[in-house]
């Protein structure tokens, strides 16, 4: 994981998968276009990436998808869920936060500095707030035509520097970018 810290002392990264046309899920949040292909991927680096972070910040949409998984995928990792409507969660080591500022205060109070931002809205928020340091995107060899966009609307250009790219199994490609901070 890139060691460039933002002004809050965080090293925040994203590790996401998209279709070739830039969607992270269908309109109904389903991932059927990814799940079957993903099983043939082999090593994507996700396990090493996940082991390198201290906590994960996700939004309600991601939470709603993951809570229905047969197995809880996060072990004992610290999870912060951003939601204005979710009251609580039964997940271990997880808390609900009404605002990003509240979540950031919790991260600081707990001494957490290496964070995984997950989900389209959460990643976009981290980008907009200047919190994201690195983005890894695995691209599935499929066009799904419509769905939930990876980044949605951005208020301004976000400059990226390619730091790695590779071909994965099952026709996937993966690129990692460093988010370039403006001098202003």
Image (cartoon, rainbow, N blue to C red):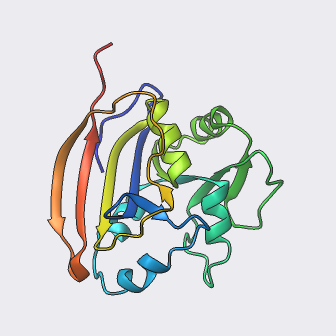
- Which of the 4 image quarters holds residue 106? top right
Q: Position of residue 102 (x, y in %)?
A: 68, 35
**Which is more toward the observer, 74 or 109?**
74
Q: Position of residue 96 (x, y in %)?
A: 73, 50
Q: Which residue sits furthest right?
A: 87
Q: Position of residue 68 (x, y in %)?
A: 67, 77
**Which is more toward the observer, 135 or 152?**
152
The residue sitting at 51% across, 52% down in the picture is: 120
**Which is more toward the observer, 70 or 50?**
70
The residue sitting at 43% across, 60% down in the picture is: 23
Q: Which residue sits furthest front?
A: 145
Instruction: Establish if 132 lies above or below 34.
Output: above
Instruction: Establish if 78 lies above or below 70.
Output: above
Q: Position of residue 84 (x, y in %)?
A: 77, 44
Q: Check the picture and name the quadrant holding the C terminus.
A: top left
Q: Is residue 53 left or right of residue 161?
A: right
- Which of the 4 image quarters holds residue 107? top right
Instruction: Establish if 180 lies above or below 113.
Output: above
Tally the marks.
0
Q: Which residue sits furthest top?
A: 184
The residue sitting at 67% across, 72% down in the picture is: 67
């Amino acid at each position: 994981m890139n060691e460039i810290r933002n002004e809050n002392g965080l090293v925040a990264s994203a590790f996401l998968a998209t279709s070739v046309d830039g969607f992270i899920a269908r309109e109904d949040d389903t991932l059927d276009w990814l799940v079957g292909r993903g099983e043939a991927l082999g090593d994507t680096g996700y396990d090493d990436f996940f082991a390198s972070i201290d906590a994960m910040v996700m939004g309600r949409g991601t939470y709603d998808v993951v809570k229905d998984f047969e197995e809880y995928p996060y072990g004992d990792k610290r999870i912060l869920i951003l939601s204005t409507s979710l009251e609580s969660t039964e997940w271990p080591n997880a808390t609900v936060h009404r605002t990003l500022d509240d979540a950031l205060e919790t991260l600081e109070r707990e001494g957490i500095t290496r964070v995984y931002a997950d989900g389209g809205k959460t990643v976009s928020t981290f980008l907009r707030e200047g919190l994201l340091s690195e983005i890894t995107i695995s691209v599935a060899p499929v066009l799904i035509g419509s769905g939930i966009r990876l980044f949605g609307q951005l208020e301004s250009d976000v400059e990226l520097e390619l730091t790695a790219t590779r071909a994965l199994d099952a026709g996937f490609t993966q690129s990692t970018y460093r988010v370039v901070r403006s001098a202003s």
